Image (cartoon, rainbow, N blue to C red):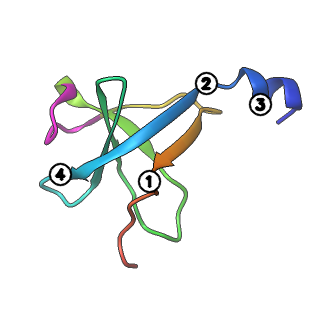
């Protein structure tokens, strides 16, 4: 990624809100809920919106490729 691309990339500041009924971490940014659909520590974050913006909603749309993600306070991962 070039410096210009990096500067133009969207940033999501995801604040941890808990875990859904499937044990997946749920985050919020600007009133929108997001979920890490594969929160294994050994894998990169796979962030999607939540269907209907519901805490226990199904994963919906993936965030655009190249989005910079900041986890607040940190990424919540499974133990394996």
Q: Determine if the magenta segment contains residue 5.
A: no
Span colored in magenta: 53-59
What's the CA distance linking mark 3 and mark 4? 32 Å
Badge 2 element: loop
Q: Is residue 37 above or below residue 49?
A: below
- Crowding near pointer 4: few (<14 within 10 Å), some, many (20+)? some
* Residue for badge 4: 20
**Residue at the spot 55% in from the left edge and 57% down from the top edge:** 44
Q: Is residue 39 above or below residue 7?
A: below
Badge 3 element: helix
**Residue at the spot 40% in from the left edge and 79% down from the top edge:** 80
Residue 49 rendering spot, x and y as whole percentages: 33, 32
**Which is more N-terminal, label 4 or label 3?**
3
The dot on residue 73 is 1
* Residue for badge 2: 10
The dot on residue 6 is 3
Q: Is residue 36 left or right of residue 11?
A: left
What's the CA distance linking mark 3 and mark 1? 22 Å
**Residue at the spot 21% in from the left edge and 61% down from the top edge:** 23
**Residue at the spot 54% in from the left edge and 43% down from the top edge:** 70
**Depth-wise, is mark 3 or mark 1 nearer the camera?**
1
What's the CA distance linking mark 4 and mark 2? 26 Å
Classify the position of the N terminus by image quarter. top right
Q: Nearer the viewer, residue 62 or 16?
A: 16
């Amino acid at each position: 990624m070039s410096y210009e691309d990096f500067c133009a990339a969207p940033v999501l500041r995801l604040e941890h809100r808990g875990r859904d009924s499937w044990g997946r971490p749920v985050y919020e940014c600007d009133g929108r809920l997001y979920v890490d659909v594969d929160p294994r520590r050994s894998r990169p974050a796979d962030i999607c919106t939540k269907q209907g913006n519901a805490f226990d909603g199904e994963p919906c749309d993936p965030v655009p490729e190249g989005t910079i993600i900041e986890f607040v306070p940190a990424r919540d991962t499974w133990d394996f």
